[in-house]
Image (cartoon, rainbow, N blue to C red):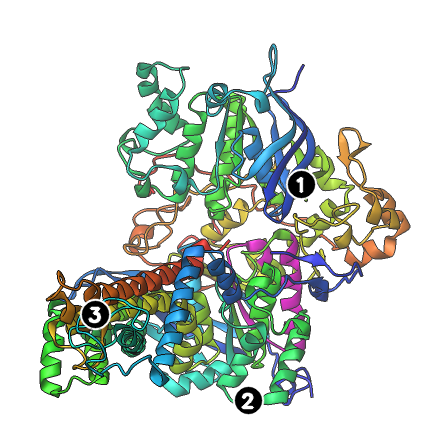
């Protein structure tokens, strides 16, 4: 730590310590940001994510053609000036649908990450902080949940709710995706609650809510953010997979997964119908994972000098 | 007679991204055969880097950038700095060995104690395999490990902290080196165990004639075992001399203040301790002039600009100070008086008692 | 109004005969290896300890690592619940207290921790850390709170301009001042200090020791000062309790303990500590104890010290637990042969 004497005035008593300037105020977050921005792969990821976000927002107000409109041009029409990515099996504009699909992908990814993080953080905090029977129950739930295939849970959920609206798809994926977050937060909480500063907070009369929100959660935030970042591509992929199976967002919603599914039957005839959304999906997943990795390295305390 | 170890103008610097840290910056000292020398200082004073430099074990990105470390009493001393990798391997553990603060991290947790002690010998060719094998138990006995013969089969985790430190000492002495460097060997230990280890080091020094460099922040430990003391501050030697002179008649204000800032076991309650204001300097940006001047209560204008040399202040006593305590106490008595702590004489000598230390008393716990 | 002239401080009694805290037969066992079917054993960290801390004094609690002194400190500060026994503070037993009632008691009873690096939340600023106790008890708001924080920071030798800095920007000594300020801001009566200087550099230790003494005088504080360094304890304490393997071996006023220790363990402990004076050191001969402190899972029978004691006699010492009783006026020792070493 940089400590340089700010003045050389001699002070005999204990106040002398404070005549020394403390180091420059560098918050832990700033430090992490500096490391993140020096990682080019993560920056590439971030750039793609920002681009995707812009496209998704734009698609809500404008697309070259309506995403649902059929017969705009020739069925399976190849790329042209009017339709840069061509047309699909019912003559819809693929670029428009791709843009609409970005919004769906991001909504599913962010929505699921948010919702499953909330569930996972809440249960993880409770289990790790209160231990005892609370922990036993939550850990049991997690372990049993792990044993049930995600697909089965989602299918049952969709059948019971009897709706394939996007918000229900998000809920369905979230109730399968919170397990890792809960485990992570439980482990972090178990470790943090034994730390001396938490003990100190208890000794100054901090209530449990304060201990959890001011002392434990902020110190677990680094790993939580990283975990949440990984949840986004996983959810996007899962939604694509569900749509591919016909369980995702209902037609004519332009989900990337559904677009792949619709096109792959005619793969030999018109490969672009499948390849364009597949490529978009791949780039998005790579970008999100790259950003997640960069974030993990930036926030990992072991990387901190 | 030439000294066993002669360090000449040693500089060990760390080249970091934001500048150079001169952890050790031009120190010169010697250690005679069979001597015990204490190097004292706070964290960041460079005392540990000094010892690591002697072993050529300076961690990256540190490098010895200047100076000589001459080792060897008889015949031609060799310069450790210039040794080849082959030579330095042979030098370490054989001519000089080192023990560290935390004995647990220095021992391999999955290997038996006896094996590790034997391996310390087989790494060098002073003893044959047969000899090495037969020396293990006597060595463990020498460091007073009770039931040594049975304990060779044990693993490090089955030993207590003090016992592990004894094993480290046994390993350090296994090749009969002429110098043992002990870096804070008792800091991690309890006082009763610390006393055992100090006693052991003192006896081994006497019996085997091994010279010892004791690196510590604890002046009291130095007083109990060392014949000479080197006081380091900010990468430099600020005072050096015989233990008695340093403790009775310190000339550098840092030494003087340090001795008065420590509560003493033999001092009564509520004598206000002297405080050394401020913090040890930031080594990447040390103050100009004397490195101690921002914290020195006796400084004069000259101290702010010009660094004093390590000058002879008495027979075999050296101090790096423009003022010196013998002058300060005369010219600035009010500053000294404000800080002076009355130390009453020891009334009841707690140690005029017959000690009992038979090793295997009935009921004694094999720790 | 400053903290110093507050009515709480004005009305605080300093009477070194009057018990402020009474610890009665307190035990703290940590179960280990207990499965679903019960069984398993326990670390008997504190095993039947009784003593009192008197109003306005500093009681030094010393012992080697593993003797249970830190656990005892945390049991008294109600950070660990006691397994059994009573901790009576201001006439009330703290041990059965839970929830809001216990939380309210914490205003009067604070703790200073050993490690100034680990005991401060790295995500909070210094101002938030020192202000948190006030927030917890709704004691001062807005400007008033920040005034209190400023005042306490100055009292503890910290520059209030650094209010918005994070702990990692400070040195060890400064951080320990932050920890002390946090304990002081509630204006407590009693402070448990758990090895507050042992993690600091030698030249910094005296600053903290002097600060603690100064605060005690100004705010009429009562300290339980836990340490392994007997030199510091002698410097600070009115009375000293010596702990070994979960039990108190000897307790007396500081002068008697250091000048005339009755328990052989205390005697050995004192003789083990080097004095920074080579002439004295040359004359002294430490009483070297055999081995190290046994495991608190399975402590020795009878007197716990008998396995290392130079004057143990058998079978009495290995069979009968010596009671902690008064040997010479007010000087308590738990030894069958007190004063005979």
Give the x, y percent position of residue C71.
40, 65
Q: CA distance from mark 1 to mark 3?
A: 77 Å
| Tag 3 subunit | A
Q: Is residue A237 visible to us here?
A: yes
What's the magenta bit mostly, secondary-structure-wise?
A: helix
Q: Which residues are magenta?
A: C203-232
Q: What secondary structure is found at the residue carrying circle 2?
A: loop
Tag 2 and tag 3 share a subunit? no
Q: Which residue is mark 1?
A: B235
* Location of residue C140 (image quadrant): bottom right
**Mark seen at residue A77:** 3
Q: Which residue is mark 2?
A: C139
* Location of residue C181 (image quadrant): bottom right
Q: What secondary structure is found at the residue carrying circle 3?
A: loop
Q: CA distance from mark 1 to mark 2?
A: 49 Å
Q: Is residue A130 above or below residue A20?
A: below
| Tag 2 subunit | C
In the rendered structure, does residue A134 fall within the stretch colored magenta? no
Give the x, y percent position of residue B338.
80, 59
* Location of residue A228 (image quadrant): bottom left
Who is closer to the viewer here, A76 or B291? A76
**Where does the N terminus of chain A fall, quadrant-wise?**
bottom right
For the image shown, how many numbered marks are present on the structure?
Answer: 3
In this view, the residue farthest toward the top is B75
Labelled pair 1, 2 in contact (Cβ < 8 Å): no
Categorize mark 2 by other alpha carbons within 10 Å: few (<14), some (14-19), many (20+): few
Q: CA distance from mark 2 to mark 3?
A: 74 Å
Q: Is residue A261 above or below residue C260?
A: below
């Amino acid at each position: 730590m940089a400590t340089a004497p700010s003045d050389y005035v001699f002070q005999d008593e204990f106040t002398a310590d404070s005549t020394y300037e403390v180091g420059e105020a560098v918050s832990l977050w700033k430090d992490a940001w500096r490391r993140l921005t020096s990682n080019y792969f993560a920056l590439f990821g971030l750039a793609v994510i920002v681009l995707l976000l812009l496209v998704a927002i734009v698609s809500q107000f404008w697309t070259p053609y309506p995403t649902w409109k059929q017969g705009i041009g020739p069925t399976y029409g190849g790329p042209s000036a009017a339709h840069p990515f061509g047309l699909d099996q019912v003559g819809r504009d693929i670029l428009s649908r791709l843009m609409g699909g970005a919004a769906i992908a991001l909504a599913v990814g962010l929505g699921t990450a948010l919702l499953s993080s909330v569930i996972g953080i809440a249960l993880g905090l409770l289990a790790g902080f209160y231990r005892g029977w609370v922990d036993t129950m939550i850990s049991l739930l997690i372990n049993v949940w792990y044993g049930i295939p995600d697909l089965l849970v989602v299918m049952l959920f969709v059948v019971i709710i009897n709706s394939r609206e996007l918000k229900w798809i998000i809920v369905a994926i979230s109730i399968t995706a919170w397990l890792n977050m809960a485990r992570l937060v439980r482990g972090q909480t178990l470790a943090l609650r034994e730390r001396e500063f938490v003990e100190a907070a208890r000794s100054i009369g901090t209530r449990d809510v304060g201990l959890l929100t001011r002392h434990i959660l902020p110190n677990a935030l680094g790993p939580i953010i990283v975990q949440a970042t990984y949840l986004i591509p996983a959810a996007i992929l899962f939604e694509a997979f569900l749509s591919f199976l016909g369980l995702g967002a209902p037609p004519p919603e332009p989900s990337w997964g559904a677009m792949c599914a619709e096109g792959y039957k005619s793969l030999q005839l018109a490969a672009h119908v499948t390849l364009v959304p597949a490529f978009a999906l791949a780039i998005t997943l790579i970008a999100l994972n790259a950003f997640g990795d960069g974030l993990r390295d930036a926030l990992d305390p072991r990387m901190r000098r | 007679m030439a000294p066993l170890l002669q360090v000449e103008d040693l500089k060990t610097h760390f080249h970091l991204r934001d500048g150079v840290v001169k952890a050790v910056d031009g120190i010169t000292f010697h250690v005679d055969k069979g001597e015990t020398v204490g190097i004292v200082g706070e964290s960041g004073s460079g005392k540990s880097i000094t010892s690591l430099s002697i072993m050529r074990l300076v961690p990256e990105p540190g490098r010895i950038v200047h100076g000589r470390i001459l080792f060897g009493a008889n015949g031609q001393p060799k310069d450790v700095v210039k040794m080849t990798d082959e030579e330095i391997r042979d030098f370490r553990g054989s001519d000089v060995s080192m023990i560290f603060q935390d004995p647990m991290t220095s021992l391999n947790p999955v290997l038996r104690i006896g094996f590790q002690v034997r391996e310390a010998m087989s790494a060098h060719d002073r003893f044959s395999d047969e000899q090495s094998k037969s020396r293990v138990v006597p060595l463990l006995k020498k460091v007073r490990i009770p039931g040594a013969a049975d304990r060779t089969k044990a693993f490090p985790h089955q030993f207590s902290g003090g016992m592990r430190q004894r094993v480290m000492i046994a390993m350090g002495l296994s090749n009969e080196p002429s110098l043992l460097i002990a870096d804070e060997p008792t800091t991690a230990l309890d006082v009763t165990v610390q006393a055992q280890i100090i006693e052991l080091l003192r006896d081994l020094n006497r019996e085997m004639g091994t010279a010892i460099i004791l690196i510590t922040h604890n002046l009291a430990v130095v007083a109990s075992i060392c014949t000479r003391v080197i006081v380091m501050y900010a990468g430099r030697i600020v005072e050096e001399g015989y233990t008695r002179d340093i403790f009775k008649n310190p000339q550098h204000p840092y030494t003087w203040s340090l001795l008065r800032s420590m509560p003493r076991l033999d001092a009564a309650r509520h004598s206000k301790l002297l405080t050394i204001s401020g913090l040890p300097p930031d080594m990447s940006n040390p103050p100009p002039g004397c490195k101690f001047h921002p914290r020195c209560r006796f400084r004069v204008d000259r101290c702010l600009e010009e660094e004093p040399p390590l000058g002879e202040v008495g027979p075999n006593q050296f101090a790096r100070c423009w003022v010196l305590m013998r002058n300060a106490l005369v010219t600035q008595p009010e500053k000294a008086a404000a800080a002076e702590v009355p130390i009453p004489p020891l009334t009841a000598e707690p140690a005029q008692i017959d000690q009992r230390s038979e090793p295997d008393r009935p009921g004694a716990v094999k720790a | 109004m400053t903290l110093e002239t507050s009515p709480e401080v004005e009305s605080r009694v300093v009477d070194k005969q009057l018990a402020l805290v009474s610890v009665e037969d307190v035990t703290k066992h940590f179960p280990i290896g207990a499965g679903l079917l019960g069984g398993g054993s326990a670390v008997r960290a504190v095993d039947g300890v009784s003593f009192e801390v008197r109003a306005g004094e500093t009681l030094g609690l010393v012992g080697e690592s593993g003797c249970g002194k830190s656990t005892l400190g945390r049991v008294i500060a109600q950070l660990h619940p006691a397994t059994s026994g009573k901790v009576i503070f201001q006439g009330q037993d703290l041990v059965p207290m839970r929830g809001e009632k216990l939380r309210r008691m914490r205003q009067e009873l604070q703790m200073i921790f050993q490690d100034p690096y680990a005991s401060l939340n790295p995500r909070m600023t210094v101002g938030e850390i020192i202000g948190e106790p006030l927030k917890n008890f709704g004691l001062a708001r807005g400007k008033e709170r920040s005034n209190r924080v400023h005042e306490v920071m100055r009292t503890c030798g910290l520059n209030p301009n650094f209010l918005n800095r994070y702990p990692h920007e400070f040195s060890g000594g400064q951080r320990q001042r932050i920890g002390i300020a946090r304990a002081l801001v509630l204006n407590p009566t009693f402070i448990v200090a758990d090895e507050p200087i042992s993690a600091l550099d030698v030249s910094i230790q005296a600053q903290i020791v002097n600060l603690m003494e100064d605060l005690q005088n100004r705010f009429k504080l009562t300290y339980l000062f836990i340490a392994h360094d007997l030199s510091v304890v002698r410097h600070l304490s009115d009375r000293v309790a010596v702990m070994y393997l979960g039990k108190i071996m000897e307790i007396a006023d500081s002068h008697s303990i250091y000048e005339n220790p009755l328990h052989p363990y205390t005697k050995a402990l004192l003789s083990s500590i080097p004095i920074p004076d080579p002439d004295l050191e040359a004359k002294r001969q430490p009483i070297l104890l055999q081995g190290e402190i046994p495991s608190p899972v399975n402590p020795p029978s009878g007197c716990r010290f008998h396995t290392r004691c130079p004057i143990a006699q058998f079978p009495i010492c290995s069979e009968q637990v010596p009671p902690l009783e008064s040997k010479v006026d007010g000087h308590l020792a738990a030894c069958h042969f007190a004063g005979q070493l």
